[in-house]
Image: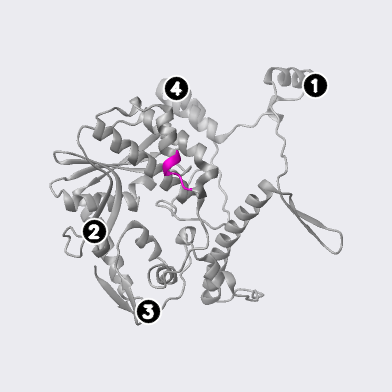
């Protein structure tokens, strides 16, 4: 394993998708890989995801060694395997994990060319296979299939968010796994990379070619060079704050700073934006803890000396549905135009328009005449994506 000396500190170079994420912030990198700071927060999604991975790995192993199909495993067998592989920290999620593994059992098929599952793959700085502890590049690939010069990589995810096609195309973890597998199977020049969504029991697929992996490799080398040139361990807030386990130690979250009456310089604006970004994540984590408390206790009520009240708790927001035939009858009887009561939803119209384009182009053209293009700008914090500099339809 290669070790870098940065600002007098020895940083072991353990390149993995997680390492590359942490390296976006020098302070986070130092706390995790040099100071080895213990994380005070337990991410429920991480624990439940790991439990599901372990259960799936055991079922896969049993299926391969006993030559059984996944659907041959009974509900009781799956239940016992899930119970065995779920730690007490994920007790509240064990029912969900069981449902995810059942979905996987019913809908997943082990291919004829599987070469590994939950495969720990490790190589040194010269791309030679080595032990896990001595590796410069390493990762655990959930599922690997090699059929002649084509590879299939599958990564199980417990997340609820379904990624867009653009997000899949730029998914760094999938690129890293394809690149890593390619070092072990250099004859493979085309990869199909899938994310299997455990909550929903289906997958989304993207592709990586040899050319894509060559570009990814150079991008990774550039980032390693940037790590070598770290000039200080100051935090650098940004998108990666989503993944930081040390928000409570970040000076941008803990320092008390008087707000300027007006931002007058780029330096002031940058410092203020960094503080806001980190505090957003601190507030997000704090709200989750309050919600967990209220789930099993009373609401948390703040009382002002003037009698004002502010409550953290659940509040019902009623919603209503109307029978359109009755609404139409009432409006017509009252002489009220239907347009006063009906609102055209842009998302519904977009769906209808797509169907008309396929099935009735003349009506699609007529509907196009009804469209009036408008736009508005809104100030907010957001994660930029490809195409944000172009016009975006609402």
* Callout 1 secondary element: helix
**Label 2–label 4 contact, CB within 8 A:** no
Quarter location, residue 25: bottom left
* Callout 2 secondary element: helix
Would you call the spot at circle 2 few (<14 residues within 10 Å), some (14-19), or many (20 or more)?
some
Question: What residue does disc 4 label?
Answer: 362
Task: Indicate which label's residue lies in the foreground, 3 or 1.
Answer: 3
Q: Position of residue 300 (x, y in %)?
A: 73, 54
Q: Position of residue 231 (x, y in %)?
A: 37, 79
Question: What residue does disc 1 label?
Answer: 334
Q: Position of residue 310 (x, y in %)?
A: 77, 55
Cα separation, mark 2 vs mark 4, equals: 49 Å
* Callout 4 secondary element: helix
Give the residues in magenta: 83-87
Cα separation, mark 2 vs mark 1, equals: 69 Å
Say above or below: 385 vs 152. Answer: below
Between disc 2 and disc 3, whose residue precedes?
2
Say above or below: 48 vs 72. Answer: below
Question: What residue does disc 2 label?
Answer: 217
């Amino acid at each position: 394993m290669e070790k870098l000396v940065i600002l007098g500190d020895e940083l072991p170079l353990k390149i993995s998708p997680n390492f590359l994420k942490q390296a976006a912030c020098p302070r986070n990198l130092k706390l995790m890989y040099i100071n080895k700071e213990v994380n005070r927060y337990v991410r429920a999604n991480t624990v439940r995801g790991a439990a599901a991975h372990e259960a799936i790995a055991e079922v896969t192993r049993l299926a391969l060694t006993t030559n059984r199909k996944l659907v041959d495993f009974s509900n009781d067998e799956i239940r016992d395997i899930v119970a065995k592989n779920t730690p007490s920290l994920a007790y509240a999620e064990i029912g969900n994990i069981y449902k995810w593994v059942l979905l996987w059992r019913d809908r997943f098929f082990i291919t004829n060319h599987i070469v590994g599952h939950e495969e720990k793959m490790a190589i040194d700085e010269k791309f030679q296979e080595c032990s896990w502890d001595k590796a410069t590049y390493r990762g655990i690939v959930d599922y690997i299939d090699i059929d002649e010069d084509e590879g299939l990589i599958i990564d199980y995810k417990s997340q609820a968010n379904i990624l867009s096609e653009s997000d899949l195309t730029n998914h760094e973890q999938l690129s890293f796994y394809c690149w890593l597998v390619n070092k072990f199977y250099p004859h493979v020049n085309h990869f199909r990379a899938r994310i299997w969504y455990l909550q929903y029991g289906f997958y989304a697929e993207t592709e990586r070619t040899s050319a894509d992996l060559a570009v990814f490799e150079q991008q990774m080398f550039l980032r390693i060079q940037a790590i070598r040139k770290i000039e200080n361990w100051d935090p650098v807030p940004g998108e990666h704050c989503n993944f930081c386990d040390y928000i409570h130690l970040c000076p941008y979250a803990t320092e008390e700073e008087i707000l300027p009456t007006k931002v007058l310089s780029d330096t002031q604006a940058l410092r203020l934006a960094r503080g806001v970004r980190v505090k957003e994540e601190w507030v997000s984590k704090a709200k989750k803890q309050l919600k967990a408390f209220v789930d099993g206790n009373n609401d948390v009520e703040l009382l002002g000396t003037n009698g004002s009240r502010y409550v953290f708790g659940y509040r019902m927001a009623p919603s209503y549905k109307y029978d359109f035939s009755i609404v139409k009858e009432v409006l017509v009887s009252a002489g009220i135009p239907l347009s006063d009561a009906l609102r055209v939803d842009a998302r519904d119209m977009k769906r209808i328009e797509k169907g008309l384009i396929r099935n009735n182009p003349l009506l699609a053209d007529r509907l196009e005449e009804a469209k009036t293009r408008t736009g508005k700008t809104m100030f907010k914090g957001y994660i930029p994506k490809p195409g944000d500099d172009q016009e975006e339809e609402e």
